[in-house]
Image (cartoon, rainbow, N blue to C red):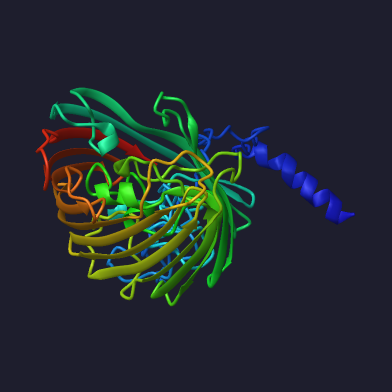
Amino acid sequence: MLALVLPAAVALWCPLAGAQPAQRLPAQPPTADALPVPPPVAPTIPVAPPPGAAPPGGAPATPPSGAAPPSGAPATPPAGATSGTPAATPDAPPATIAPSAVAAPGAPAAGTSPAGAAPSSGAPPAAAAGVPPPAAPAAGGPPFQLAIGRLVLSPLVLVQAQAVPYVGEDAFLQAGDVAEGQGFRLRRARVGFAGRLAGYVPFAVSGELAGGADGSARLSEAWIGYAHFPFANLYLGAHDVPFSRSAMTGAGEGALIERPLAVRAMAPSRQVGLHVEGHFRGRAFSYFAGMFNGFQRSDQFFAGYVENAASFGNRFDHIAYVARLATEPLGPLPRSVQDLAVSRLRVGAGASYFFSDGGTRDIHGIGADVLVQAAGAHALAELLWNQSDPESTPTQPLGQLAPVTSIGMVGEVGYFVRRIKLGVSARFEWLDPNLDLSDETDSWALTAGASYHFIDNTLKAQADFTHRQERHGVALDNDAVALQLQLNL
């Protein structure tokens, strides 16, 4: 009882004694200042590190297949590709990405164009190339790619707009000259795409929007590959014939505006057919072997071989057989003829042969080529030999009545100054279209040019001067100055 009464008495007595009553606790705590809300963060797209760069954590990175690391050390390329331009790239691509293109392809020839540096481990050959591999930063950076599940796509675009401020009165397009009069010319307007499905099925489709003599559109390349094994990559469709290094290099990857006259006249370009290629020990050794529709030659020597990429099949010719052996003992060469990466010494050499069992002509062809790159400099040499024998009962009208043996030699040197993005090159050619005949077609040509690279080899401006000298007959006025602006994806 006392335990209940005493506390109550004390509570009543305290206010009377003058003690201050306790303050009431507020019903709710004071409202705190609102915390600032950060703006929503936009999702970021992961960007692959440049070839040769170390991933987070400092572990060394493995450069992408087919791409040479910035230091110039050899990289182990994937099989196949564009280079550009099938045999790198058909005319490349990045990039022409053709299977067997000179350029090492990666995830491509070009369609490109596309053996010089075709990869060797599961990517399309060449410029050219299923999807070309990311190049070293100094050589152009990674290509534009879109990944959709197991499918990777890359655009193929080649636009070459030319201006000809001077050309001789005797210049003639069918004789291999750049133009027939002063003015402008759209040399190429190529568009398409290359890709790779499930990592080992490269493909490319592209067309020339102004490819015909009348400016009509025509197919440039369309091929499918199976590049699962480095020692045996298969390519089927309209693509580059693995014969000449310069022909297999993408049309946008040269140091000068045009390919050599001898190559345009004596090397078969894209044809419909099948070929297999293999690459060993980082492209230290490569082989190419294929069968194509028979090659059709124009009666005009400098008009070269007809590109047979139509859907009508093999109507007038039989089968052509092609073989090529190549080596790059110091590491894979890039897609470009120029040493844009200013790399250490790299060498590529190849020897090729074809026999076309044609309906109008039987043609034998032999080729040999060497390309050397080091510290920004490059040197290229090619030898081409053709022998054409007319059939006794041709399947098409034929102006050739007797066997004809042709020979062409090409030598080119150049230097690229990366600091100012400027390259200079010079090329000498010696041509004899018919060893049994001496006339105006026997000639030599000297071409000198400069190229300024706004964005590596993707966007560049070029200027060339060509002097042609006939060794027999009447001297022709066919010198020319040509300017070109090129976009090459």
Left or right: residue 306 compared with residue 72: right
Percent x, y of residue 102: 37, 58
Tell me which corner region of the image, top left, top right, bottom left or bottom right, holds residue 343.
bottom left
Residue depicted at x 12% and y 42%: 473
Q: Residue 161: where, in percent of width, then height?
A: 29, 30
Using the image as rendered, state which of residue 22 and residue 226 is in the foreground: 226
Instruction: State left or right for residue 165 relative to residue 361.
Output: left
As displayed, is residue 224 above or below residue 348?
above
Q: Residue at x 63, y 37 (%)?
A: 21
Whether residue 260 is visible to the viewer of this picture, yes or no, is: no
Residue 360, given in percent of the width and then of the height, sits at 48, 47
Q: Quadrant of the N terminus?
A: bottom right
Query: Relative to the observer, which residue lies in front, 310 or 78?
Result: 310
Q: State whether residue 346 is above or below residue 188.
A: below
Q: Is residue 277 above or below residue 398?
A: below
Q: Quadrant of residue 327?
A: bottom left
Q: Quadrant of the C terminus?
A: top left
Front residue of 294 and 326: 294
